[in-house]
Image (cartoon, rainbow, N blue to C red):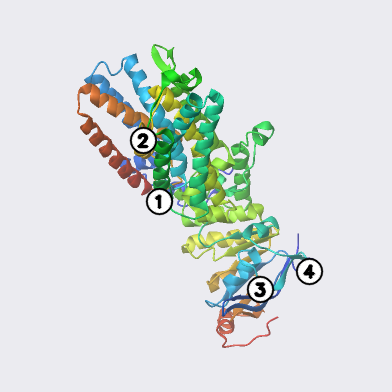
């Protein structure tokens, strides 16, 4: 899973338009995500970051434009559609169920059943296997701070909860993982852990889209940066060729850049 | 697995976020993880105190009486637990049970329907009532409190209209209907079939809630419906199924009630909706949803039964019994609030 197939993006959006009444959220946006990269999406408030991501993950349906996943045209009507295609999203609201334990949260909504009639007829869930898989998944992401997967999530710190959410996405996001402001609710050290997880995901070959306000974090972890401005893609830059000051200048319109 | 040595030095482990600094904090964390402990302690203490105050309390005949008194409320409370776990509430449980019992009794005694068919009709009433409550909560998005306050009155009126206010005596019914009142001895204590049925329902629901995906989803929907939705759970469908399941349990409660009072009366058990909520709350299930167990509810129902029975044996006025139950409720909810603060 190296970046040999750079010719074809795994996820490609072209000419996305989304209006809310008279407000134009997206005004013909293009986006490409390649294999094995972390693509950051940044932009000022109201630049259309959230709307763009919602269109890619099925939370909103674009008015115009097309989305291609591995070259195939896809139409997402609801989040489940995107998920069924292997696109998993981590939300900034720490969307986990506090009273359930770590393993139960990882498999929430797609519990593993016991083999044989116990599972098929009585629909019994296989707690042992889910706990085992949860441990493996967390270990694969390099999350060493969650030894006990039977702890209720509410006993965890914000960073650990986000780790659970990221692990859930990684476990099932076979093609793309989207993280919407994953560090917004977190402290400095916890944010760092999440960034490490993102890097880990990429190293496992899972391409990541990261939406963030936090410039230093974006520049630390992203391979390419998609800058959104006034409902359009203003530029795509890399941390190697541009500085944070350049990025802010493009975001605010102080500098122009070829939007490719 | 990874040993602790492999983890970065200490402070990030989950344990850090549990307050173990004081003995009180440690107790709170224990109660937080096992919410059924506090009602169990209260029940054991109550049994010990009443047993010491009055030697008749622990006699087999009295324990048998307590178990029979708990059977109906305990079954209603089981249905109530399911609804409260989703952060809802069902004020109509008593009314649905009474309507169900009247339909079972009248169709068999007056319309000459075979007893099994009569019971099936009772089940249909329970399921129908659950479907109605569930429809109003999930489709019209009305708060469960309002929905069931309305349906409580609707079902009460239907019961009186249908029965004409008349009681059907157990002696006139086929034996199958009063089977739930039959007793057999277990170690000197007379146990009714109704008590056994209640216990079987508890075991079944406990297994379902802990061991199936549906059970986990019930907790998740009550805990944080938005998080459940984002995890791909169809929250409205789970809620509707919960009210339906509660209706089925209420139909069984109707059967137990007929055996317990050896009659079907439109006026008996109407006020049990509040007792069922009391049992659930004392049992440590949170009214905010997502937290609690059916075993806590069983303990809660037993506590209320033991308090009422014990206080009357000691010779305390019935009004003071009600007073004591009221104090229990407030104490139980206070403890729940205190336990919830254990989260950081």
**Chain of the residue under the numbered disc 3 shown in the image:** A
In the picture of the structure, the residue carrying the numbered disc 1 is: B146
Q: Are marks 4 and 1 on the same chain?
A: no
Cα separation between marks 4 and 1: 56 Å
Judged from the image, the secondary structure of the residue bearing numbered disc 1 is helix
Cα separation between marks 2 and 4: 66 Å
In the picture of the structure, the residue carrying the numbered disc 4 is: A8
Assess whether mark 4 and mark 2 are in contact (beta carbons under 8 angstroms): no
- Tell me the crowding category of disc 1: few under 14, some 14 to 19, or many 20 or more residues within 10 angstroms, Cα based: some
**Chain of the residue under the numbered disc 2 shown in the image:** B
Q: Are marks 1 and 2 on the same chain?
A: yes
The residue drawn where x is 57% and y is 86% is A253
- Tell me the crowding category of disc 3: few under 14, some 14 to 19, or many 20 or more residues within 10 angstroms, Cα based: some
Cα separation between marks 3 and 1: 39 Å
The residue drawn where x is 39% and y is 14% is B189
**Chain of the residue under the numbered disc 4 shown in the image:** A
The residue drawn where x is 33% and y is 46% is B338
Q: Give percent across and percent down for residue A122.
A: 63, 33
The residue drawn where x is 28% and y is 23% is B48
Cα separation between marks 3 and 2: 54 Å
- The tag on residue B272 is 2
Q: Along the horizontal axis of the image, is B9 left or right of A14?
A: left
In the picture of the structure, the residue carrying the numbered disc 3 is: A63
């Amino acid at each position: 899973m190296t970046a040999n197939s750079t010719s074809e993006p795994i996820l490609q959006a072209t000419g996305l338009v989304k209006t809310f009444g008279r407000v134009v959220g997206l005004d013909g946006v293009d986006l490409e995500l390649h294999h094995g990269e972390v693509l950051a999406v940044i932009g000022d408030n109201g630049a259309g970051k959230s709307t763009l991501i919602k269109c890619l993950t099925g939370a909103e349906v674009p008015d115009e434009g097309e989305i291609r996943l591995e070259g195939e045209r896809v139409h997402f009507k609801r989040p489940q559609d995107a998920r069924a295609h292997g696109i998993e999203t981590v939300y900034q609201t720490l969307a986990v169920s506090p009273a359930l334990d770590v393993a139960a949260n990882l498999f929430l909504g797609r519990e593993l059943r016991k083999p044989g009639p116990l599972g098929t007829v009585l629909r019994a869930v296989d707690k042992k296997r889910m706990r085992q898989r949860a441990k493996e998944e967390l270990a694969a992401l390099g999350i060493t701070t969650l030894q006990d997967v039977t702890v209720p999530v509410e006993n965890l710190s914000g960073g650990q909860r986000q780790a659970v959410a990221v692990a859930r996405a990684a476990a099932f996001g076979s093609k793309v993982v989207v993280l919407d402001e994953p560090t917004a609710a977190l402290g400095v050290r916890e944010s760092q852990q999440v960034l490490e997880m993102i890097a880990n995901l990429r190293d496992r070959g899972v391409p990541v889209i990261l939406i963030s306000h936090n410039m230093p974090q974006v520049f630390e972890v992203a391979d390419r940066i998609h800058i959104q401005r006034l409902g359009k893609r203003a530029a795509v830059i890399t941390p190697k060729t541009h500085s944070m000051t350049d990025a802010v200048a493009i975001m605010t319109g102080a500098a122009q850049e070829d939007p490719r | 697995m990874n040993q602790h040595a492999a983890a970065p030095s200490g402070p990030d482990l989950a344990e850090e976020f549990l307050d173990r600094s004081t003995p009180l904090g440690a107790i709170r964390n224990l109660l937080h993880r096992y919410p059924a402990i506090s009602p169990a302690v209260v029940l054991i203490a109550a049994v010990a105190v009443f047993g010491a105050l009055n030697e008749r309390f622990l006699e087999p005949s009295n324990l048998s009486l307590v178990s029979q008194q708990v059977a109906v409320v305990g079954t209603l409370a089981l249905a109530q637990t399911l609804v409260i776990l989703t952060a809802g509430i069902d004020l109509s449980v008593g009314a649905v049970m009474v309507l169900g019992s009247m339909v079972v009794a009248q169709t068999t005694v007056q319309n000459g329907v075979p007893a099994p068919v009569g019971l099936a009709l009772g089940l249909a009433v329970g399921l129908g009532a659950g479907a109605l409550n569930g429809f109003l909560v999930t489709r019209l998005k009305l708060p469960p409190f309002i929905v069931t306050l309305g349906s409580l009155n609707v079902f009460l009126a239907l019961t009186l209209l249908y029965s004409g206010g008349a009681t059907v005596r157990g002696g006139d019914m086929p034996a199958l209907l009063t089977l739930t009142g039959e007793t057999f001895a277990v170690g000197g204590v007379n146990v009714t079939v109704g008590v056994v049925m209640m216990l079987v329902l508890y075991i079944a629901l406990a297994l379902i809630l802990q061991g199936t995906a549906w059970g986990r989803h019930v907790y998740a929907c009550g805990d944080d419906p938005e998080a459940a939705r984002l995890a791909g759970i169809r929250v409205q469908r789970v809620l509707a199924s919960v009210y339906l399941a509660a209706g089925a349990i209420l139909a069984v409660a109707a059967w137990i009630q007929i055996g317990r009072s050896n009659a079907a009366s439109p006026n008996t058990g109407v006020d049990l909706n509040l007792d069922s909520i009391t049992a659930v709350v004392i049992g440590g299930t949170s009214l905010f949803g997502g937290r609690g167990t059916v075993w806590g509810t069983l303990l809660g129902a037993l506590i209320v039964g033991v308090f009422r029975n014990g206080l009357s044996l000691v010779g305390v006025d019935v009004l003071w019994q009600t007073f004591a139950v009221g104090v229990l409720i407030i104490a139980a909810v206070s403890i729940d609030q205190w336990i919830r603060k254990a989260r950081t």
